[in-house]
């Protein structure tokens, strides 16, 4: 039984049948190799890892960038994984969701940062604004005072 002919924008391209299938998978958000849902730009989880393993072997690279596949290997696939933003922005979003500092894994003291980073941010903002007066109502300042009193 011959397969029914698919007529679409790729049908008349002068490329192999295999290549057309790849292009269709690509268009439909599927893995280029097997047609499963994608987790990277071109591949499903299984094939993304396979491609990466092969690439590593070929180039002999032992150290590598933290890419999406690393996060998948680590089991971090969540609502942010597929967003078209940088990995560091995703990490920040995850930290915010989990009540962690944007810059490190410490718990939040202000809305976005741990004590250390809140202070750093405030110093930076003060320098930028040329502000000399300390805002004693700042949450980070109050938190620092409380810690001092507790110590
Ligand atoms: Zn696949
Ligand atoms: Zn921090």
Image: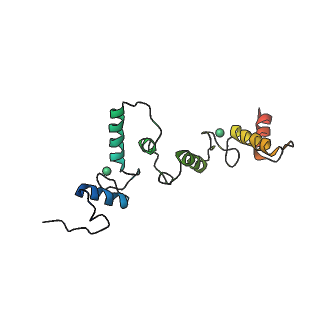
Q: Is residue 120 left or right of residue 91?
A: right
Q: Is 74 rendered above or below residue 42?
A: above
Q: Quarter-wise, where is residue 30 in the image? A: bottom left
Camera sees residue 141: no
Question: Which residue is outermost to the front?
Answer: 14
Task: Give 136 or 34, whichever is nearer the viewer.
Answer: 34
Identify the residue shown where x is 72% and y is 42%.
Answer: 121
Q: How many dots with numbers?
A: 0
Identify the residue shown where x is 23% and y is 58%.
Answer: 17
Task: Give 14 or 59, whichever is nearer the viewer.
Answer: 14
Camera sees residue 117: yes
Q: Locate the N terminus and report the quarter of the image it occupies.
A: bottom left
Question: Which residue is outermost to the left?
Answer: 1
Q: Position of residue 109 (x, y in %)?
A: 70, 44
Q: Position of residue 103 (x, y in %)?
A: 62, 41
Q: Quarter-wise, where is residue 118 in the image? A: top right
Task: Give 81 or 128, whichever is nearer the viewer.
Answer: 128
Q: Is residue 43 left or right of residue 108?
A: left
Q: Position of residue 5 (x, y in %)?
A: 21, 68
Q: Locate the C terminus and report the quarter of the image it occupies.
A: top right
Q: Is 35 rendered above or below residue 65?
A: below
Q: Position of residue 123 (x, y in %)?
A: 76, 40
Q: Is 22 rendered above or below residue 2?
A: above
Identify the residue shown where x is 41% and y is 41%.
Answer: 73
Identify the residue shown where x is 74% and y is 41%.
Answer: 124
Q: Is residue 33 left or right of residue 86?
A: left
């Amino acid at each position: 039984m011959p397969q029914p002919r698919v007529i679409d924008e790729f049908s008349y391209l002068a490329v192999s049948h295999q290549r057309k299938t790849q292009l269709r998978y690509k268009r439909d958000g599927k893995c280029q190799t097997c047609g499963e849902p994608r987790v990277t730009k071109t591949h499903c989880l299984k094939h993304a890892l396979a491609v990466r393993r092969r690439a590593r072997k070929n180039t002999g690279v032992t150290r590598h960038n933290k890419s999406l596949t690393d996060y998948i290997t680590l089991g971090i696939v969540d609502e942010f994984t597929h967003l078209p933003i940088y990995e560091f922005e995703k990490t920040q979003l995850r930290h915010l969701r989990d009540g962690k500092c944007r810059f490190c894994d410490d718990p939040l003291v202000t809305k976005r940062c741990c004590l250390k980073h809140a202070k750093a941010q405030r110093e930076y903002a003060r320098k930028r604004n040329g502000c000399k007066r300390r805002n004693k109502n700042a949450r980070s300042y109050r938190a620092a005072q409380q810690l001092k009193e507790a110590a």
